[in-house]
């Protein structure tokens, strides 16, 4: 028979004093303490940005402190995520050692790595994130009791992840992906496409996608830089503002933009002309191109529209 300690689940297990001490000692080393100072009451911490006392909870963790920064000081929180992503990228690149010969000729240098000698076992958090992103799972799935029972049936030591924790992990993964995308697009000559549409719920959206050809493999790559809900009407100035915000966010200058492609609807044509104007003002040479698929659709529609009237006229002549 299982002991009372074994019968308790991670959700109803009480926190022991030793666990509280361990948690408080490790949480005091967290990055959030750069923006907090300890209060006379250990349960609270004083935010140095807005002078707000934040309740740390009975276990005195840094979770509430991190959530306060995320909700009230989003800029500071994103700066931390960006710095953390850059650190991870630098650490992954420093794992490779480049060795050159005695002459120092870099042309015959080789890169040695220990990766082939290890079996990479991905972490539970990493696998969970990839599964949720690839299958479009809602955040509440991690709090579903049957999902947790399935995870524990595979491994009784599987961590119990809350919705707030998965949101923080998703924010870190997003920032890491952004920094990686910036590194890939750095110095690349590119073209970009944009379009706006209205959903069945009468909500307008705008998207912007960057395209470039890899110089070594000659493969075409595309990155969706953003999908945003439009505010107000569908003006060509608004579409240009949305796209230029994304270009600036990913450090993509007009000087490297070869072309912008839109459909041939009047608003998008006006947006294309404005793109060309802004590019010329920034010493760029971006060209506007109308989407060939949209042009073929219009030509086909015009042709069949004319044939319809010819057919009707032919029927009319036959009835005379």
Image (spheres, rainbow, N blue to C red):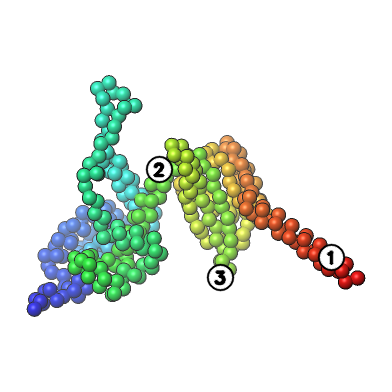
Q: CA distance from mark 3 to mark 2?
A: 37 Å
- In this view of the protein, can residue 78 be seen by the observer? no
Q: Nearer the viewer, mark 1 or mark 3?
A: 1
For this rendering, which residue is in front, 94 or 28?
94
* Quarter in which the N terminus is drawn: bottom left
The mark nearer the N terminus, 2 or 1, is 2
Q: Can you tell which quarter of the image residue 165 is in? A: bottom left
Label 1, on which residue?
314
Q: Exactly how many numbered labels are in the figure? A: 3
Rendering coords of residue 287 (x, y %): 61, 42
Residue indicated by mark 2: 183
Farthest residue, direction right: 320
C-alpha gap between disc 2 and disc 1: 63 Å
- Residue 161 relative to residue 198: left or right: left
Q: Position of residue 188 (x, y in %)?
A: 47, 39
The residue drawn where x is 11% and y is 74% is: 5
Q: Residues within 10 Å of mark 2 (few under 14, many from 20)?
A: some
Left or right: 303, with 205 as reference point: right
Name the residue beneath numbered marker 3. 201
- From this viewpoint, which residue is outermost toward the front? 318
| Residue 49 spot, x, y in % from top left | 34, 56
Between 181 and 113, the one nearer to me in the picture: 113
Q: Circle 2 — which element?
A: helix
Q: Nearer the viewer, residue 95 or 90?
A: 95
Residue 196 location, x and y as percent? 58, 58
**Lower sequence index among marks 1 and 3:** 3
Element assignment for label 3 = loop
Foreground mark, 2 or 1, reads: 1
Mark 1: which secondary structure?
helix
Figure check: 186 above or below 151:
above
Residue in view at x 56 percent, y 66 percent: 199
């Amino acid at each position: 028979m299982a002991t009372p300690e074994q019968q308790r689940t991670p959700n109803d297990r009480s926190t022991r004093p030793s666990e509280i001490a361990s948690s408080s000692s490790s949480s005091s080393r967290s990055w959030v303490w750069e923006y907090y100072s300890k209060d006379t009451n250990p349960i609270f911490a004083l935010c140095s940005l807005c002078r707000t006392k934040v309740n740390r909870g009975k276990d005195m963790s840094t979770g509430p402190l991190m959530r306060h920064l995320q909700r009230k000081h989003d800029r500071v929180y994103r700066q931390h995520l960006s710095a953390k992503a850059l650190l991870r990228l630098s650490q992954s690149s420093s794992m490779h050692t480049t060795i050159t010969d005695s002459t120092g000729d870099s042309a015959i240098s080789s890169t040695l790595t220990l990766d082939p000698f290890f079996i990479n076992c991905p972490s539970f958090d990493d696998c969970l994130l990839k599964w949720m992103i690839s299958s479009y799972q809602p955040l509440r799935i991690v709090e579903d009791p049957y999902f947790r029972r399935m995870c524990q049936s595979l491994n009784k030591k599987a961590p119990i992840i809350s919705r707030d924790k998965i949101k923080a992990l998703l924010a870190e993964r997003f920032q890491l992906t952004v920094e990686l995308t910036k590194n890939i697009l750095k110095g690349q000559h590119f073209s970009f496409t944009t379009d706006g549409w209205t959903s069945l719920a009468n909500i307008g959206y705008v998207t912007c996608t960057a395209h470039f050809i890899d110089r070594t493999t000659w493969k075409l790559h595309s990155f969706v830089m953003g999908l945003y809900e439009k505010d107000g009407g569908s003006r060509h100035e608004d579409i240009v503002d949305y796209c230029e915000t994304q270009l600036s966010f990913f450090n993509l200058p007009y000087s490297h933009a070869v072309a912008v492609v839109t459909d041939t609807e009047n608003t998008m044509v006006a947006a294309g002309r404005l793109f060309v104007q802004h590019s010329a003002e920034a010493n760029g040479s971006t060209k506007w191109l109308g989407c060939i698929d949209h042009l073929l659709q219009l030509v086909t529609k015009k042709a069949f529209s004319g044939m319809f009237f010819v057919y009707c006229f032919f029927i009319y002549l036959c009835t005379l």
